[in-house]
Image: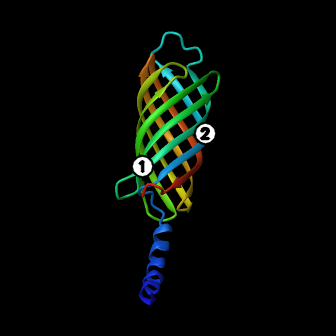
Amino acid sequence: MRRLALLSVLLLPARAGAADRLDHRGALGLEVGAGYEHASVLLVQDPANLDAGRLTLDLAPTFGVGTEGNELVALIRLVRGPDWGGALAFGYRAYFGRDEWKTFFQGSIKADTAPHLAIGADANAGAMFELSALFGLFAQIEVSVEGGHGLRIGLGASAGFQVRSYLLE
């Protein structure tokens, strides 16, 4: 019994240290963000409502993959400007840094509905500040180039928070 007590005392600090880590390895997460996007559609005959700014509301489930804490990210976006619309995206986010402050780059395939259906590449770059192993704040900029009824070019910025769970680890 004495050996079991000694072993548990020695292992508790090691387990507590693992809980304090700030990477996203094995984490399931959910991001909520809001921002602004300006989109222009080029190579179209009727340019009405094709060059506009829109407010964005994002919901993005994330899944930590690999040993570096990078993530697969799915995006569901609601946009509101002169018109209503939405977007779906799926991509890979690579983090740089292991402390409270991290930078990241994310490449995605994205489909937008405002002002017309368009599908193409989306790139995000940003920073995340980890308040704990389970909660972080982020800000990012975004550039997208999509084809459909014309060539849609989008530039935007957003900020929000990410909550994480390590249930699958």
Q: Nearer the viewer, mark 1 or mark 2?
A: 1
- The correct choice, above or below, for 40 with respect to 31 in the image is above
Q: Is residue 12 above or below residue 3?
A: above
Name the residue located 53 percent from the left edge and 10 percent from the top edge: 46
Front residue of 123 and 89: 89
- Residue type at mark 2: give it: Gly
- Is residue 36 found left or right of 62 in the rendered image? right
Check disc 1 and give the amino acid type.
Answer: Glu
Point out residue 130 in the picture as x, y percentages from the top left corner: 54, 60
Q: Residue placed farthest to the left in the image?
A: 66
Q: Residue at x 45, y 87 (%)?
A: 1
Say which quadrant the C terminus sits in.
Answer: bottom left
Q: Write the residue at 59% across / 44% down.
A: 32
Furthest-bottom residue in this view: 2
Q: Secondary structure at mark 1?
A: strand
Relative image position of residue 10 (x, y in whole percent): 44, 83
Q: Position of residue 112 (x, y in %)?
A: 49, 26
Judging depth in this view, the residue of 85 and 103 nearest the camera is: 85
- Tell me the residue that label 2 is attached to: 35
**Mark seen at residue 71:** 1
Q: Earlier in the sequence, mark 1 or mark 2?
A: 2
Most foreground residue, 142 or 57: 57
Question: Would you identify the image quadrant in which residue 109 lies?
Answer: top left
Tell me if mark 2 has few (under 14), some (14-19) or many (20+) residues whose alpha carbon lies within 10 angstroms of its own. Answer: some
